[in-house]
Amino acid sequence: MKNPVKVTITGAAGHIGYALAFRIASGAMFGVNQPVILRLLEIPQALPSLLGVGMELEDCALPLLYDIVLSDDPAIGFRETDFAILIGAKPRSKGMERNDLLLENAKIFAAQGKSINQHASADVRVLVVGNPANTNALIAMSNAPDLQPQQFSAMSRLDHNRTLGQLANKTNSKVADIRRAIIWGNHSVTQYPDISQCTINGQPAFELVSRDWAIDHMIPRIQRRGAEIIEARGLSSAASAADAVVNHVHDWVLGTPTDDWISMSVPSDGSYGISEGIVFSLPVTCREGRYEIVQGLEIDAFSRTRLNITEQELLSERAVIRDLLNQG
Amino acid sequence: MKNPVKVTITGAAGHIGYALAFRIASGAMFGVNQPVILRLLEIPQALPSLLGVGMELEDCALPLLYDIVLSDDPAIGFRETDFAILIGAKPRSKGMERNDLLLENAKIFAAQGKSINQHASADVRVLVVGNPANTNALIAMSNAPDLQPQQFSAMSRLDHNRTLGQLANKTNSKVADIRRAIIWGNHSVTQYPDISQCTINGQPAFELVSRDWAIDHMIPRIQRRGAEIIEARGLSSAASAADAVVNHVHDWVLGTPTDDWISMSVPSDGSYGISEGIVFSLPVTCREGRYEIVQGLEIDAFSRTRLNITEQELLSERAVIRDLLNQG
């Protein structure tokens, strides 16, 4: 057996963390020959519940799970970790202003960035799930000066998978036959799910569905899918979010298929004219543990308008929390 | 790709069902080359929540998940199904007598047995998880006269895995190195977790732990582990139960390792002197989709006493619900 990889989950006793921990420990993220050590972090008041999660993990007798560490101390939770999956975040409470939410979370993710910088493996890879995920990732990244920006990402894979699901459903095709969906921008209602590059069994998606359907139905539905789930379940997406985390890290580490790409929110490098200094969802391919932004895709006028809207939102989010960005 | 297998889950919007559906659909139960169709059943008042589960499954874009059927009609839910995983059951409410709980559930599982008999595949395999699981399985089985009793089982795999977990923890060994744990009897506080046959890296477990530890600590802790989890989490075991369901069906279909066995609650055939006509947890091996009860293990005086206690409990449960057993 290989040496175990260390995976830290924050907010590990929450709904997404609970759905995720067992998936990772059963081999879904790194394959069935890769042992793992789970380092589960929670806030102090959630420690009893986290203890229960730890007991249930023990009760699964999972052969790949070499150790479980439960803590409310980031210095312990992030110690030498290879992967930090940051789920815990402050949710919007009633009457809370949007800017207050951004600032409250900025403090949390600034502290976590510092702690990761200090305690994690030098090769750590970070995935931010807790919302506002893109800007939280930017803050964590900017507070980890010893790490490369490319070690930080935020999750747009759930939106990506939702796009595949909607398109498969609409065209009565299999998701495995669909390639090259893209989520551009922020994981928010301004995101732009783009199927203009999509093929289904090699055929362009826009030969099978109309642009009007995409604009009037698919895009708004993906943008507001989270709310649709909450309305049905009375709870926010958990198992599907956990599944997207598994996909995101799996593909980042083990690579994307040769004829496809995935969507990841990563630090903008100016590709497609997007401002640097924000974390923006882009189409990427992964090889040998590194992602590369897909280059040279045509951006038509409609897409450009959508890209601008979501870019502006991310720039305005950054303006709110700029004092917490460590520019050193 | 092979033809998809059809899997029905009852109580699919509950905590265990929610943890389970995504595991099955991602390939954990039947392997990554076996497509599945999920037929999710719920009671009418849980249909909105079930709709949300269906949306989240769609949002995962899982390549193996060929179709999702959501229904509150057993005739639809069990139609031509290959595997029926019966999780939904009436929980004990405050002030409810034990016999009332048995009878309320007996009605549910009698109806489900009849429906499975009428609608499911002739080769269907049934796993009862909803408590009291062993007696519920007996009722379902006895109401399905066209099926073989060996097509019905109840779950003791969570208890089995908990035993491996406790023993690994106590001896600081890997669960993968432990063989031949046994859960005997009822999935209740009378169950008998038996490590007298266990080896750890080939060494008898009782050379590494004392019989007193097993009797005074391990056995009572496994028997009451469910309550321990509830106390910590404020919720009953869900992800660990779902994981045990995955293990149970996986091994039943794909076989047990050559040098090990598992615990399954199955109709007693008189082995080890256990009365026929009850569903009793026993050590079994599985080959080609069928289980066989492990024969010839020595039962010492201590074990015999424990077997008698749990057998008596199952006989008394059967006495309460005997009018619902279809003897035709």
Image (spheres, coloured by chain):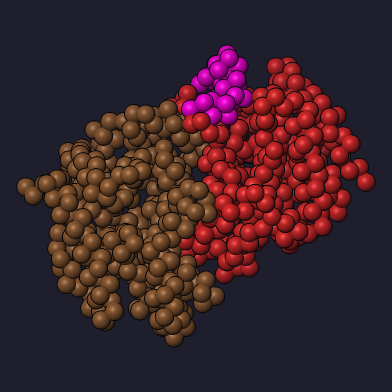
Chain colours: A brown, B red
Residue B35 position, x and y percent, is 58, 64
Above or below, comparing residue A208 to residue A186 in the picture: below
Q: Is residue A114 visible to us here? A: yes
Residue B214 position, x and y percent, is 58, 19
Span shown in magenta: B205-232
Q: Residue at x 70, y 24 (%)?
A: B95
Residue B309 position, x and y percent, is 75, 21
Nearest to the observer: residue B290 or residue A116: A116
Q: Is residue B221 magenta?
A: yes
Q: Residue at x 14, y 45 (%)?
A: A324
Q: Is residue A148 magenta?
A: no
Q: Is residue A20 visible to us here? A: no
Q: Is residue A21 left or right of residue B55?
A: left
Residue B257 position, x and y percent, is 59, 45
Nearest to the observer: residue B265 or residue B79: B79
Above or below, comparing residue A82 to residue B132 in the picture: below
Q: As drawn, which residue projects farthest toward the front?
A: A95
- Which quarter of the figure is the N terminus of chain B placed in? bottom right
Q: Is residue B57 left or right of residue A84?
A: right
- Residue B188, quarter of picture: top right
Q: Is residue B162 left or right of residue A103?
A: right
Q: Residue at x 66, y 41 (%)?
A: B129
Nearest to the observer: residue B284 or residue A119: A119
Q: Is residue A121 left or right of residue A211?
A: left
